């Protein structure tokens, strides 16, 4: 059974190599089965959430259902009622794990409803880069994925969480996450979805304490018949806290809502929102909905939003250099989606760029 | 190499070119003067094939072929290149990546050009983004070296460039057009040609130019020695050209 998943083209195309030789650890689930859970680096713990709850009493005391309430909404209720599945990962105090920790969630049976609950912890001064890939086996066209993910960054920790989604046309996805970012910690959240999907709704919440920072990047490519409602909710609670919510969305016929909600509550907190959307074909819709609320007079929140077609001027410029209209468009779109993400390891950044290149494709220039 | 015959062009409903005739032979470099707003950029953009420049009448012939109906990129692939007067910034694309795309499959692009054009620090930045006026002009030249067209149009390559750097722009144009003391042949067997739009004429000190034209009222007047034309413009302004036009 493992063999056919390993061989799956899509797994590979997302950069997931389940053997995980160059990964700090690997976790994989197909439908509701835990396929794999292993660690290669010391100072890092990776195990099924059920096992963590049994073995580690502090998980229930301090983390499990502590950032998100089980009766918050329909999604959390479903997750709470379902059999317990998901990833528990923790990096020990002061450990800096640069190789990515990978987690894969695969829908393998038609019309299956995959339900997971993850808890991720970076202890004081620790660093970890979690990469999750969510996708369907090639023969699956419908199903759903519900996820609750609670993320804890203790003092001065650095955690990046990159989600690559590659679903099928009839799949509906409801990932719900919340991150608590303690003093001086930095959290980077990347969400990348590049294939047709019936519906994705995700609005991760980030609570940012003193001198801490949260940065959220959403890179969305929405083909026809896709509906993607995505964004982030940053609560800048701490003094000097920083928040940034950046989205780059491209529609070739799909509907996208790019949201961002920043609440400035801490003294001298700063936040910025960037929602940029490009419509490549008629029939698509992109709404950018930035929302800024300042609760103090020393707060600075700003936003920048632009939606519409590609710049004619830029296209003409590249065409005058000999690039055809399609080549110029593909080059600009790929450039548009390859946002610089400070703090992300080079390898991970390259992987993201490669995925974008492969999906947006166009002619190799 | 290039022949423009009785070209009438409309932009945004306004007739800007009213019967332009221009012939540039292989290995020749011409300079085009003209007051602000006279339509110099429009003429270059029309030759390049910008869709907003609507050809109402006339023909553009390149290497013996009428190119009126060709899209921009096909013209570029035939060997027409252009340095824009105000090049846009292209977000998300690094200058180096664009140069590599343009130079791909052609030999002759030398990485030494980055330092020659003083762009070593710019190549890893997004194309033209946050570049100063002079840096943009040099970025144009760099891209043209990579593209290696046989006919190159330069739209005010020296505007916004400080006096000291004008010699660099001049050297770069000479090198791009393979004009030293004598016109060299491109390895492919042709001599390159050029059309330089200039406001100031400063470049005449650096680039050997064969002929000058002046664009007035949508038409080209003059077809003379560049230095004589520049002297007339400097002494009498473009009025001098109009007078000259009547007496010619
Ligand atoms: N899109 C446009 N619609 C209407 N008029 C335009 C447009 N673009 C340029 N023009 C006008 O056409 C004239 C010629 O412009 P241009 O070719 O840029 O002149 P030059 O390069 O000689 O300064 C100017 O008066 C300019 O304002
Ligand atoms: Mg002009």
Image (spheres, coloured by chain):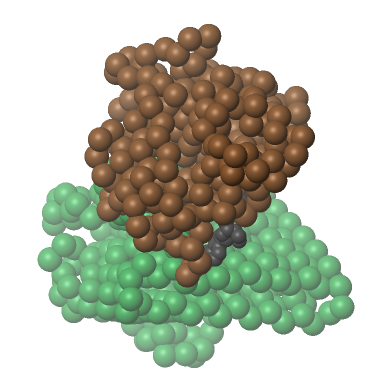
Chain colours: A green, B brown
Q: Percent x, y for residue B170?
A: 61, 23
Residue A193: in sight, yes or no? Answer: no
B12 horizontally vs A185: left or right: left
The residue depicted at 43 percent of the width and 58 percent of the height is B9
Q: Which of A331 and A149 is in front in this view?
A: A331
Q: Which of B163 and B109 is in front in this view?
A: B163
The residue depicted at 63 percent of the width and 45 percent of the height is B242
Q: Which of B142 and B17 is in front in this view?
A: B17
Ligand 1 visible in quadrant: bottom right
Q: Percent x, y for residue B149?
A: 39, 31
Q: Percent x, y for residue B205?
A: 67, 21
In the displayed structure, A242 sits above or below A229; it is above
In the displayed structure, B45 sits above or below B227; it is below
Q: Which residue lies furthest to the front in this view?
A: B247
Q: What quarter of the picture does the C terminus of chain A occupy?
A: top left
Q: Percent x, y for residue A311?
A: 48, 61
In the displayed structure, B128 sits above or below B11; it is above
Q: What quarter of the picture does the N terminus of chain A occupy?
A: bottom left
Q: Could you tell me how many numbered marks the image carries?
A: 0
Q: In which quarter of the image is residue A86?
A: bottom left
Q: Which of A238 and A349 is in front in this view?
A: A349
Residue B234: in sight, yes or no? Answer: yes
In the displayed structure, B155 sits above or below A110; it is above
Q: Residue furthest top?
A: B181
B41 horizontally vs B47: left or right: right
The residue depicted at 38 percent of the width and 49 percent of the height is B6
The residue depicted at 40 percent of the width and 66 percent of the height is A250
Q: In which quarter of the image is residue A225?
A: bottom left
């Amino acid at each position: 059974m493992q063999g056919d998943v390993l061989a799956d083209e899509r797994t590979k195309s997302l950069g997931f190599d389940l053997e995980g030789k160059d990964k700090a650890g690997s976790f994989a689930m197909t439908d509701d089965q835990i396929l794999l859970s292993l660690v290669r680096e010391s100072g890092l713990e990776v195990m099924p959430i059920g096992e963590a709850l049994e073995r580690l009493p502090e998980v229930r005391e301090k983390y499990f259902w502590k950032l998100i309430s089980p009766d918050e909404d329909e999604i959390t209720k479903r997750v709470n009622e379902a059999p317990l599945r998901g990833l528990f990962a923790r990096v020990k105090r002061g450990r800096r794990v640069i190789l990515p920790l990978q987690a894969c969630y695969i829908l393998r049976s038609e019309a299956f409803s995959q339900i997971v609950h993850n808890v991720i912890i970076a202890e004081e001064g620790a660093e970890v880069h979690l990469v999750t890939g969510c996708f369907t086996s090639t023969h699956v066209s419908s199903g759903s994925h519900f996820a609750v993910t609670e993320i804890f960054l203790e003092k001065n920790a650095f955690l990046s969480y990159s989600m690559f989604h590659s679903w099928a046309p009839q799949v509906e996805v409801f990932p719900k996450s919340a991150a608590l970012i303690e003093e001086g910690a930095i959290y980077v959240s990347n969400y990348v979805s590049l294939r047709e999907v019936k519906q994705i709704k995700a609005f991760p919440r980030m609570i940012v304490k003193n001198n801490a920072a949260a940065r959220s990047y959403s890179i969305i490519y929405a083909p026809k018949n896709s509906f993607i409602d995505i964004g982030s909710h940053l609560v800048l609670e701490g003094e000097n806290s920083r928040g940034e919510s950046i989205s780059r969305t491209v529609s070739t016929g799909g509907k996208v809502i790019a949201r961002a909600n920043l609440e400035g509550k801490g003294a001298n907190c700063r936040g910025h929102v960037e929602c940029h959307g490009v419509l490549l074909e008629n029939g698509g819709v992109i709404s950018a909905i930035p929302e800024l609320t300042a609760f103090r007079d020393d707060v600075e929140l700003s936003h920048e939003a632009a939606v519409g077609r590609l710049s004619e001027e830029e296209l003409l410029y590249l065409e005058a250099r000999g690039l055809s209209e399609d080549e110029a468009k593909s080059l600009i779109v790929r450039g548009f989606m390859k946002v610089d993400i400070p703090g992300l390891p080079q390898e991970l950044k390259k992987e993201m760029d490669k995925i974008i290149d492969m999906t947006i494709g166009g002619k190799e220039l | 190499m290039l022949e423009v015959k009785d070209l009438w062009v409309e932009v945004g409903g306004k007739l800007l070119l009213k019967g332009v005739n221009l012939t540039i032979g292989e290995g020749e470099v011409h300079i085009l003067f003209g007051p602000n707003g006279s339509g110099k950029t429009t003429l270059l953009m029309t030759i390049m094939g910008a869709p907003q420049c609507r050809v109402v009448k006339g023909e553009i012939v390149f290497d013996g072929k009428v190119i009126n109906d060709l899209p921009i990129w096909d013209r570029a692939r035939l060997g027409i290149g252009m340095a824009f007067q105000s090049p846009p910034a292209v977000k998300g694309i690094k200058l180096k990546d664009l140069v590599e795309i343009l130079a791909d499959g052609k030999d002759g692009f030398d990485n030494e050009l980055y330092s020659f054009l003083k762009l070593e620090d710019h190549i890893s930045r997004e194309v033209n983004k946050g570049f100063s006026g002079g840096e943009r002009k040099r970025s144009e030249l760099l891209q043209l070296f990579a593209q290696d067209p046989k006919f190159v149009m330069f739209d005010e390559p020296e505007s916004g460039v400080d006096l000291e750097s004008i010699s660099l722009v001049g050297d770069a144009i000479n090198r791009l057009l393979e004009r030293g003391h004598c016109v060299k042949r491109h390895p492919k067997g042709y001599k390159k040609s050029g059309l330089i739009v200039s406001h100031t004429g400063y470049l005449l000190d650096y680039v050997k130019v064969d002929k000058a034209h002046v664009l007035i009222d949508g038409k080209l007047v003059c077809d003379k020695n560049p230095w004589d034309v520049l002297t007339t413009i400097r002494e009498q302004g473009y009025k001098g050209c109009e007078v000259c036009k009547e007496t010619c």
